[in-house]
Structure formats: C-alpha cells, structure tokens
Amino acid sequence: MTPNEVQDLFKNVPEDEESRVQALKQLLGTAEKLQETKSSELQNLAEQVGNGSREEPAQAAASKAHLGIYLIDLIQTRPLKEKALPYMNIIYKLLGMAVAQEFEPDLINPQAPYILLSQASLGTSEPGFPDFDGFLGLSSAALAYLSHEKLQDSFLETSGAIEVFIAAFQRAIEGTSVFNLDDTDEQAQLAQLQSMYTKTWADLSAHSRFVSLCPLDGPVAGLLLGWISSSRNAELQTAACLAFGNIARTDAQSTAFVQELSVHRSLIPIISSDSETDAQLLHCVLSFLKNLSIPASNKAILGSAGLLDPKALPRIWALDTQPQVQFDAVSLARILLINCPQNVRHVCATSDTQDKTPIQQLIDLHRKADQEPTKMETARAVAGVCRVLHSDKPVGSSLLSESSLLSASEEEARALLRSFYDKHPTLIDTLLYLGLQTKFPVLRSDLWFVLALMARSAEGFVIVKQAILQHPELKDLLAAAVAGEREASDDPPTGTGLDLSTIGQLEPRQADPKKTATEVKVDRENALVLIAELTKSGPEELPSEVRNEFVKMLKTGGELVVGDRKETGCAASQ
C-alpha cells in the first residue's frame, strides 16, 4: 500500500464490521511483508497510521478513524481476534507506534491498559503470545495510557489490575531470557522499557487507591517483600521500595512494617553492601527507611538492628560521588536521633572497626560537603544529639552504657559529657550553622532551643560561652530574636524588665513552624533563657562588655515577655 492508499483507506472506513476487518487485513498484510523483508518502510507505515501530527494527510485520516482504538477492540473482541491472530505481533507493534503519537485520553476505552498488559503477560504457549517487538508495542501503549490520571483511576478500579501490571513488569525484567535477546540495541530498548515500567509503578503506587489494593497481609505485599529479600534485581527491589514507601505514610503502617513484618532486616543488607552502588535503588531504600523511622517506637528497633553500624549509614555518608544518596542517608540518621537516647548512645560511641564515632563522621561530612542541604542535615543531626544529651536526667546519661544506666552516678554521666565535648571540639561549629544561615528561620529557632538547654548545665555552658566569644555575630542574632519582629536596638525600652530570677522561670520550648507569631515568642523566650544563663557567670568567665550587652537584652526581652503574657491573658478571658 502506498501512502495515498493508506490515506484513502482511512478516509473511507467501511461501516460494516466484515469490510473493516478486510481493510485492516490489507493494511496488516502489507505491514507483515515489510517486516519479513526487514524493510525500513514498516516504520513509515506505522507513522502514517499513528494518531499523531495533523500535518500529514495520512496521519490526520488515521487519527480521525481512531485506528489505535480499533486495534484495541480487535485484541479484545473474540471473533475479530481470531481472524487477526496471524497478524497479532504486527498489530502489537503498530499499536505501540500509534500510541506513541498524540492521542485523546477521553476517547480511549478505560479498560485499554488492562487489556494490553494482559496480552503482554501471556504465557509462551498461549495464543497471541507476543514476540519482543510485540511486547514492546503492547507495553509502550499501556504505559503511555497510564501516564494519564483518568486512565490510572480506571485501571486501579479494575479487579486484578495490580497483579496484571506486576506480571507484565516481571516479564520486562526477565525479557533478556524470555525473548532470547543477544542484540545490544534490543537490550538497550528493554532497559529503557524497564525504566518506563518503574516510573509508571511509582505513579500507581502513589495513587490514593493503592493502599487499599495492597494490604500488608495480602499476596501483592508478600510478592513485593520477596522482591526485596530474595531478588537480586535492582529494578524489582526499587519497585518494591517505591510501593512500600508510598504505603508507609502513617505511623500505623510504618509500625507494622517494622514490628510485624521486620522489613528493615531485608533493607539494611542492601545499604550495607560495598558492591551496591545503584543510586536509584539506594535512594528508594533510604526513602522507605525514612518513613519507617518516623514513629517513635521504631527508632530504637532500627538502630539496634544495625542501621547505624559503620557498614550501613556511615558507609553511605562517604559516597561523595552520589550527593543525593548521601543526603538521604544523613537525613535518615537525623530522624533516627530525634528524642532517641539509644540511638544517640550508638552514634556517640566508637566501634571495634572505627576510631571515629559516627557523630564525628557527620561533623567531618558537614565540613567538607559542597551541597547546602547536606550541610543543613548534618547540623540538624548534631542538634538532635545535643538535645537528647541535655534533656537527660542527669544530663549526659545517654552516654552511659546500657549495663550501667541504673547504677551509675550523676557525676559519672557528667564526666562522660565533658569527655564527649573534649573529643568532638568542632561539634559547636557544625551546630552553629543552623544560626548563621538565613534561608530557614525555623532552624535558627531550633538552635536557640538547643543552646538554651545546653547552657543550663555546666558542661554545656562552657561550650556555649566559647561559641558566643568566638562568633560575635551570634550576639546580634540573639538581640534580633529577643526583639522579635522589631529591629534590634542599642537602647532598651522604658521599664525595669525582668530580673534574672524571673527569667529563670522560663523554660526552653520547641517552636511550632506553622505558627509564626508563636515562633517569635518562643524564640524570644529561648534566647532569654540562654542569655540569662550566660549572665550568671562571673567577670572571669564572660568579659564585662559582653555581659553588659546581655543584661540590656534581658531588660528589653523582659518587658516584651510581660507584654506577651498580658496579651495572652486578655485573649483567654474574652
């Protein structure tokens, strides 16, 4: 058939079914001959019949006739399918090429993705089993359809849709052996198709309906768990982590993954393997673990399972050539350290194979990292450690070994805290990064919170005082925090303010990042607690000019705190 004949065919589509079949057979017969002779004209023919550009007359006619839609009907309808069976692989290939062009989702049969994936996953002995080109065509068409949200909705509402997708996905993963591929171009095509399947799977598993279709005690979840634990294929492991990461969006689900399914025991070996460098897989594993680390009851379990051991997260921290993966690993560590004394104990201790503590490795990474997000996360992780150490009663008791927790004295805990700071002299520089950056005010609020806690103990006071003296700009930042939204001024407001004993009634508080007004007040109170602790020192510890500046800040802040409390009281009485 010439291009003009193809154009005429679609301009004059027969109305009766039998004539349409004959016309299609004529087209497919031409395509078959072109394929048998390996003619490059097959591609041209497919483009002519595709739903694509409106510039070519044949394409316009084909689009108007909805050939792609008719081909799907042909696959689906038994009488038509039987007549077209000899041409089925040609149909598959033409369909893939046609759908690669522009199409209208509203005109597509909502069942089309399911139909195509069902054909793609047929057994080798079943009629219509696709060859490699046919599999590419079916898969490309199905995945193109599933890039549209409306067709995703319809697909997930179809019974057995997830199972059909998984079967086709596995066929793609096993394609080299299933289709006996030895041609490098075909292998490259297959690799590209595998990536397309993974992307579509990510979209489907992020869909709101997916959680209900994949209960953790169901067969799909069981299959995905098998992909993680026993599969050596990075694409399948990545796909499983993508799906589970999307499911683990609630504390209940994350807790079940860890405390009932113990999925972390299969994840930790992946990130602990020196041979595992697949960036996509590592990113998905770490992202999944981050979700699992959010519930408080999971943190210590994950830490004790080896996630913070030298071969696990610290190994990833050293992957300078993969900055995104490195960031993911630091971020995961930060989450694990939040209010978890057991994990803080782990990162503050050396191991048999490492002289450096994990927290020192994070401090070193902060110093050498080029990426701002990584520097930020390392600083936040260090802040999390300091927060736990100074929230302990007594302070520093998280540094005690588990066996001595009950018997150790307060002085032993404090001695360990002093030793910890002596062994990590650059810790404060990492911590202060939160205050010296300007991009995220809420993180500066975290710094005041932590420094206020630290300044209440003798061991922490020494570190904070040293930081204030070495970084004069911190005084300006504290003045701004005390003043709130006003510019810091050298002249305190009129009034006596609060004396030190009144300031001592304030407690360090965590700021709420969602409430700006509250954050300003909390910043002020945390700054005042910090300043009050610093001014308690004698002239031999704090230079008189610095102490005088802080006394002025106390007077300024004292009056503002009184005003804040009056406003709160009036609002509460209304």
Image (cartoon, helix red, strand yellow):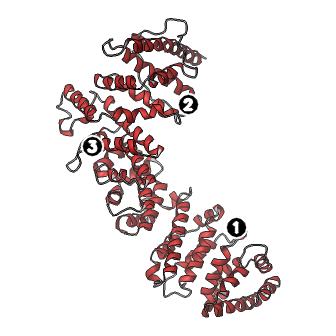
In the displayed structure image, the side of residue 428 where residue 189 appears, left or right: right
Considering depth in this image, is 84 or 61 the residue closer to the camera?
61
What residue is shown with label 3? 357
Residue 105 - label: 1
**Quarter of the figure that contains the N terminus:** bottom right
Q: Are marks 3 and 1 in contact (CB under 8 Å)?
A: no
Residue 384 picture location, percent across and down: 37, 36
Considering depth in this image, is 259 or 322 the residue closer to the camera?
322
In the displayed structure image, the side of residue 23 where residue 363 appears, left or right: left
Q: Secondary structure at mark 3?
A: loop
In the figure, 192 relative to 359: above or below? below
Q: How far is disc 3 from disc 1 in space, using C-alphas?
A: 56 Å
Q: Secondary structure at mark 2?
A: loop
Residue type (three-letter) at the residue carrying disc 3: Thr
Q: Are marks 3 and 2 in contact (CB under 8 Å)?
A: no
Between discs 3 and 2, the one toward the N terminus = 3
Q: In which quarter of the view is residue 155 placed?
A: bottom right
In the displayed structure image, the side of residue 210 where residue 349 appears, left or right: left
In the figure, 76 relative to 216: above or below? below
Between discs 3 and 1, the one toward the N terminus = 1
Q: Secondary structure at mark 1?
A: helix
Evaluate whether residue 219 shows in this view. no
Residue 375 - label: none
Q: How far is disc 1 from disc 2 in space, using C-alphas?
A: 43 Å
Identify which residue is drawn at 40% across, 69% down: 233
Q: Nearer the viewer, mark 3 or mark 2?
A: 3
Q: Nearer the viewer, mark 3 or mark 1?
A: 3
Identify which residue is drawn at 43% across, 15% down: 550
Identify which residue is drawn at 21% across, 51% down: 353
What residue is shown with label 2? 515
Label 2 crowd bin: few (<14), some (14–19), many (20+), radius 10 Å: few
Residue type (three-letter) at the residue carrying disc 2: Lys
